[in-house]
């Protein structure tokens, strides 16, 4: 047990402490922005980010992944807050957490295996574009000082790691934030700072039970929002976990992550915070800054609270240009440039799934819609590909009276018509054998196709024998098929 604790918490202490500090600084403006987006006080997002980050560090299934208040979740809260107020948002947050815990126990995290690599790539690319676009308001209608500071920040981020000795000791995003803040304060530059984003809280969060009636009417109001928040939160968290898995060459427990996200959101709602989920941008910052264990996420949450409550006078001075530079670095590092370079080498279906995911996300501004569209399109391409591997070979004996059809491949909704068309249904052979030794029937559409072929051949006067069924195919055909049930055939005829 001690070895497990050391591995999960203290195997990378220096890197986790520094990366957690970087993430905490980057979380502040985003939490404020997401609060404003949702229509609530900035402290709601800041308390949520602190609480979720701390709780998920203990309860989550993916070390080094950062969870907090997110834009994808904030978008879903706007209508609820506008029509019913903050108390109903807190209640919806509690129900969202409960639904996510249920999803974890139902092992819905295992569904991530159905998300193809092309969908993950499209998700990553779309998110990188959204992260970059979110920085544009900070670079629009501003003075040249902002552009100079942002360019200097990017220069520090990409060049500092090459400095001998100290380049590898400190995360370059942290150096960027500290240096640009010192420069802005020393020169007295009149540029936008974190303090301009909104008022920072000056007290610790307190336990807060939502002041809403505990009745069916309240449930009817919050359930649609809670369900949407739960789905989007789990989807973004599972996708982010997969990406961090790839970045760190490690695995994670997706079902534990579902339960951990639920526990974290319940804790957030009880402390006056909004619902949140994993943040790919902050997770990338964490990993690239050296974070590898649960300690990095815990440090990020604790330092965030300390900064906004006890060191707010200093935090207010951080120029937004420094954080914009960090987020631009994140967007560049997140985007899968290989997916563009290798488009001419990859199958057309793979490129279409990736591009569809990106386009849907950008048009709807909803990551869940993009992933659903990508998964659906990938499933359609897969079904179409598998259906083309179904073949039926016809052979006649020397007398020309016995015909044998050898079926090979998968028979299901996508290949059922090809299966039917492969038989000569108008030829009246005295004996017909359908050999299914190398075939498999998956659904009632495939079973219906077999029924149609057998009954049509029998109406033409052929004696039909079906042989070679494997156990699974025999079970579904015996349950839903009619060609071997005289009473069922009679009902069809009548």
Image: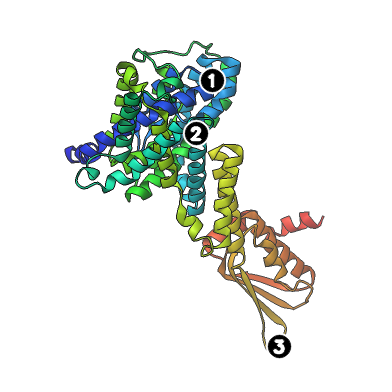
Q: Image quadrant for the C terminus?
A: bottom right
- The one of 449 and 140 positioned closer to us in this rendering: 140
Does residue 217 show up? Answer: no
Residue marked by disc 3: 399
Q: Position of residue 274 (x, y in %)?
A: 46, 23
Q: Position of residue 340 (x, y in %)?
A: 50, 56
Residue at left offset 39%, top offset 20%: 47
Residue most toward the right?
494
Residue at left offset 30%, top offset 25%: 302
Residue at left offset 45%, top offset 56%: 338
Q: Is residue 224 above or below residue 451?
A: above
Residue marked by disc 2: 139
Which mark is first along the chain, 3 or 2? 2
Q: How many marks?
A: 3
Q: Is residue 341 left or right of residue 253?
A: right
Q: Is residue 199 left or right of residue 436?
A: left
Which mark is first along the chain, 2 or 1? 1
- Distance, label 1 to label 2, CA atoms, is 23 Å
Badge 1 marks a residue whose secondary structure is: loop
Residue 39's disc is 1
Q: Position of residue 362 (x, y in %)?
A: 58, 41
Badge 3 marks a residue whose secondary structure is: loop
Label 2 Cα neighbours within 10 Å, binned few <14 / some 14-19 / many ≥20: some
Label 1 Cα neighbours within 10 Å, binned few <14 / some 14-19 / many ≥20: some
- Distance, label 2 to label 3, CA atoms, is 84 Å
Q: Image quadrant for the N terminus?
A: top left
Q: Nearer the viewer, mark 2 or mark 3?
A: 2
């Amino acid at each position: 047990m001690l070895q497990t604790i050391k591995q999960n918490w203290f195997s990378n202490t220096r890197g986790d402490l520094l990366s957690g500090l970087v993430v905490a600084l980057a979380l502040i403006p985003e939490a404020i922005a997401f609060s404003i987006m949702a229509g609530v006080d900035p402290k709601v997002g800041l308390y949520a980010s602190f609480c979720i980050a701390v709780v998920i560090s203990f309860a989550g299934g993916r070390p080094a992944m950062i969870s907090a208040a997110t834009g994808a979740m904030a978008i879903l809260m706007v209508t609820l807050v506008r029509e019913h107020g903050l108390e109903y948002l807190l209640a919806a947050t509690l129900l969202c957490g409960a639904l996510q815990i249920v999803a974890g126990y139902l092992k819905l995290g295992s569904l991530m295996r159905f998300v193809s690599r092309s969908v993950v790539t499209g998700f990553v690319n779309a998110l990188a574009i959204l992260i970059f676009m979110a920085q544009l308001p900070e670079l629009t209608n501003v003075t040249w000082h902002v552009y100079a500071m942002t360019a200097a920040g990017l220069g520090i981020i990409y060049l500092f790691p090459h400095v001998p000795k100290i380049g590898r000791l400190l995360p370059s995003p942290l150096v960027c934030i500290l240096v640009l803040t010192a420069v802005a304060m020393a020169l007295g530059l009149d540029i936008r700072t974190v303090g301009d984003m909104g008022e920072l809280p000056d007290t610790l969060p307190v336990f807060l039970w939502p002041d809403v009636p505990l009745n069916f009417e309240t449930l009817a109001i919050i359930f649609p929002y809670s369900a949407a928040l739960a789905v989007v939160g789990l989807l973004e968290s599972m996708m982010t976990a997969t990406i961090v898995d790839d970045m760190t060459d490690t695995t994670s427990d997706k079902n534990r992550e579902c339960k951990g996200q639920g526990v974290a959101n319940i804790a957030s709602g009880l402390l006056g915070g909004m619902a949140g989920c994993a943040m790919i941008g902050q997770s990338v910052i964490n990993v690239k800054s050296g974070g590898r264990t649960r300690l990095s996420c815990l440090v990020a949450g604790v330092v965030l609270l300390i900064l906004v409550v006890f060191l707010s006078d200093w935090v207010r001075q951080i120029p937004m240009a420094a954080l914009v530079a960090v987020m631009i670095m994140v967007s560049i590092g997140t985007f899968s440039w290989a997916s563009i370079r290798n488009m001419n080498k990859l199958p057309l279906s793979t490129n279409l799934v990736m591009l569809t995911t990106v386009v849907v996300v950008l048009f709807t501004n909803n990551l869940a819609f993009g992933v659903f569209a990508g998964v659906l399109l990938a499933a359609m391409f897969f079904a179409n590909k598998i259906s083309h591997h179904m073949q039926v070979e016809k052979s006649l004996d020397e007398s020309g009276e016995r015909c044998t059809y050898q079926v090979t491949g998968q028979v299901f909704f996508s290949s059922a018509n090809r299966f039917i068309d492969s038989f000569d249904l108008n030829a009246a052979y005295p004996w017909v054998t359908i050999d299914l030794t190398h075939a498999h029937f998956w659904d009632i559409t495939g079973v219906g196709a077999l029924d149609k072929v057998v009954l049509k051949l029998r109406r033409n006067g052929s004696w039909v024998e079906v042989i070679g069924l494997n156990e699974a195919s025999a079970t579904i055909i015996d349950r839903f098929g009619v060609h071997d049930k005289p009473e069922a055939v009679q009902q069809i005829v009548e």
